[in-house]
Image (spheres, helix red, strand yellow):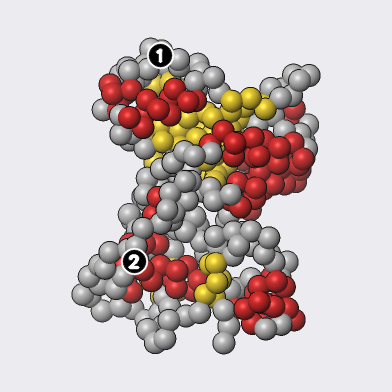
Amino acid sequence: MILDISKYQPAVDYRAAAAAVEGAILRCGYTGWGDANECRPDECFEQHYAGFKAAGVPVGAYYYSAADTIAKAREEAEFCKRVLAGKQLELPVYYDLEEPRRMGALSRAQLTAQAEAWAEVMEAAGYFVGIYANTSWFRTKLDHTRLAKKYTLWLADYRAQPDTQLQRDLHQYTSAGQVPGIDGPVDLSRIERADLLTVVKASGLNGWTKQPDEPSAPDPQPQPGRTYTVQPGDSWYRIAARQLGSESRVQELLAANGATAATVIHPGQIIRLPGEGAAARTYTVQPGDSWWRIAAQQLGSGSRMGELAAANGMAVTDTIHPGQVLALPG
């Protein structure tokens, strides 16, 4: 159970709450929807961050947007970076999109572009980012399919029979929850991604430094060719350990599937396993990179960018992001 909290819960017994929750996502800031339209820090963010961290609770953050232009979305991202500077978060940083007064008239394409603009700035700064919205907004105001391919998603749906088709890693199921140590109702969410509490730190994002992987014994059962069917509880790191012999080979696994550590996998999904010969050549996308630039630097000529994209099951018109691992063709 994940709690999300803001200035509206100013008095918290953090140790009492810690016994009841798996993590807490804290509002780090918000943009006022009125004439000022200013980016502001949540008045209780620093207090909540210190309190939950001291109590040993994994924390994440979210920013409440009132952007109605791409420029404003980028401004919110820069502000968010300043608020989070120097902090270590175990859970993702989410962009909260639900402000009807400034966003209600925006087109689906415009609002999706704003979400991507915010996420691109945050990803370039080393954050594991996601998008928060309710079912209606994911269905009608945002390109859910496009966003789900790039980011972790947090869905708010309080109905007794919530939408089961929308992909999400977190499901906010109530705004009337009760948690020890907090007076009044709170928002609560269920984790629907097995590695959500570990993937951020393991990937060295959100203020963390990636630690060397410890060798893991491979699964003794015979492996089925060069594909693997994802099982409940699997993560990229778990699959690398069990199918390839070590978590250290996760980059090869990601490259073989044109994925990043943030890419969501689901039970029943079939993924490619890299060959057992020489380790595949890979490249981790850096801020400012493009298909042409990577091809020029890694393959000797920018004209090979089409070959590079094809090696990753993509086209040169597809967007790449910092932290994404690409397979390099021979």
At a point 53% along the width and 47% down the height, the residue shown is 127
At a point 42% along the width and 53% down the height, the residue shown is 209
- Element type at mark 1: loop
- Element type at mark 2: helix
Q: Amino acid at mark 2?
A: Glu
Q: Does residue 290 lie above or below 79 as drawn? A: below
Circles 2 and 1 in contact, beta carbons < 8 Å: no
Foreground of the two, 167 or 4:
4
> What label sits on residue 247 in the rendered view?
2
- CA neighbours of label 1 inside 10 A, class few (<14), some (14 to 19), many (20+): few
Describe residue 237's horizontal placement relative to residue 218 as left or right. Answer: right
Quadrant of the rendered structure where residue 141 is?
top right
At a point 45% along the width and 16% down the height, the residue shown is 9
Q: Amino acid at mark 1?
A: Ala
Foreground of the two, 277 or 297:
297
Q: Position of residue 148 (x, y in %)?
A: 57, 51
> What label sits on residue 11 in the rendered view?
1
Q: Position of residue 104 (x, y in %)?
A: 73, 30
Foreground of the two, 302 or 258:
302
Quadrant of the frame with the C terminus: bottom right
- CA neighbours of label 2 inside 10 A, class few (<14), some (14 to 19), many (20+): many
Quadrant of the frame with the N terminus: top left
First-in-chain label (2 vs 1): 1
> What label sits on residue 33 in the rendered view?
none
